[in-house]
Image: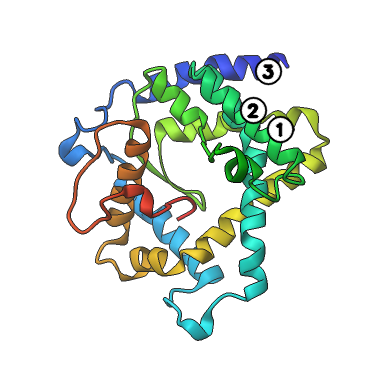
């Protein structure tokens, strides 16, 4: 527990040390700070090879449509994954001072975990109008004033920033399931979330493939989409470009 407290206390300082000397959102040329582009591009090519291995790069046709059983099961997996993520979301919203949102998500978790049969059904949204509302420690750092830092491309995990990379590491420790469940059970919760991400990748196959395999510069396109998406979520100045969706949240960039 002492190690956990030290990690939580050290993380904001680490984020500030790694990012305080770089431009904030919108201040760098074109609103993008990417001093590690050469290395990031190599990681991006690795990620594309991994993605190609598991999903291919064909946009697909109606004949290649996912199995209907899988499609019917996908919302269930997504709902369970969302329910499992709620305790971590509540912790972050408390740290951000968003106590009303934290209370709402606590209620959402209780309702879906019980009446929703372990989160398989989103009863909270369907009957009580309490929709999904995610948060993470990257957002918490932003609320605390930590700069975004440089853009990063992480192996397998995809696009990120220095601030969000630190946030992802801390979110592992902020997940209450890590502390209350046996190691095997906690690992199973991570497996469910991974399964939901894989199913989501398959669901939006056409959109993802168009970026990864049909763009003139898939790295630059993905970097721009990610930064637009993330800064839109955080209310920070976003870079602009032609040819992208008006709503940057229309394309999920997780796991590219």
Above or below residue 72? Residue 18 is above
Q: Position of residue 24 (x, y in %)?
A: 26, 27
Q: How is the image coloured?
A: rainbow
Determine the image quadrant of residue 197.
bottom right
User: How far apart in space, not on screen, are marks 1 and 2 (Cα)?
Assistant: 6 Å
Residue under label 1: 110
Q: Position of residue 193 (x, y in %)?
A: 64, 48
Q: Position of residue 95 (x, y in %)?
A: 53, 18
Q: Secondary structure at mark 2?
A: helix
Q: Secondary structure at mark 1?
A: helix
Residue drawn 67% across the image and 63% down it: 73
Residue drawn 29% across the image and 31% down it: 236
- Say if residue 200 shows up in the picture: yes
Quick one: 104 or 60, which is closer to the camera?
Answer: 104
Q: Residues within 10 Å of mark 3 (few under 14, many from 20)?
A: few
Residue under label 2: 106
User: How far apart in space, not on screen, are marks 1 and 3 (Cα)?
Assistant: 29 Å
Residue under label 3: 3
Residue drawn 65% across the image and 29% down it: 107
Q: Quadrant of the N terminus?
A: top right
Q: Residues within 10 Å of mark 1 (few under 14, many from 20)?
A: some
Horizontally, residue 243 falls left or right of residue 194, namely left
């Amino acid at each position: 527990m002492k190690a956990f407290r030290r990690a939580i206390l050290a993380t904001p300082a680490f984020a500030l040390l790694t990012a305080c000397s770089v431009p904030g959102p919108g201040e760098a040329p074109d609103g993008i700070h990417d001093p590690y582009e050469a290395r990031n591009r190599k990681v991006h090519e690795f990620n594309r090879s991994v993605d190609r291995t598991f999903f291919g790069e064909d946009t697909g046709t109606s004949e290649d449509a996912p199995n209907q059983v899988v499609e019917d099961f996908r919302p269930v997996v997504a709902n369970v994954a969302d329910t499992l993520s709620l305790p971590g979301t509540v912790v972050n919203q408390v740290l951000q001072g968003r106590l009303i949102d934290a209370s709402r998500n606590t209620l959402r978790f209780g309702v879906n975990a019980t009446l929703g049969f372990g989160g398989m059904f989103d009863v909270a949204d369907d009957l009580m109008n309490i929709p999904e509302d995610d948060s993470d420690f990257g957002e918490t750092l932003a609320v605390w004033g930590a700069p975004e830092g440089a853009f990063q491309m992480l192996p397998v995990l995809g696009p990120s920033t220095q601030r969000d990379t630190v946030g992802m590491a801390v979110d592992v420790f902020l997940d209450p399931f890590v502390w209350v469940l046996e190691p095997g059970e906690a690992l199973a919760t991570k497996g469910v979330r991974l399964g939901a991400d894989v199913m989501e990748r398959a669901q939006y196959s056409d959109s993802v493939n168009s970026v990864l395999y049909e763009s003139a510069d898939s790295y630059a396109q993905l970097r721009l989409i990610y930064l637009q998406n993330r800064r839109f979520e955080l209310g920070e100045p976003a870079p602009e470009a032609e040819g992208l969706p008006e709503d940057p949240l229309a394309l999920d960039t997780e796991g590219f």
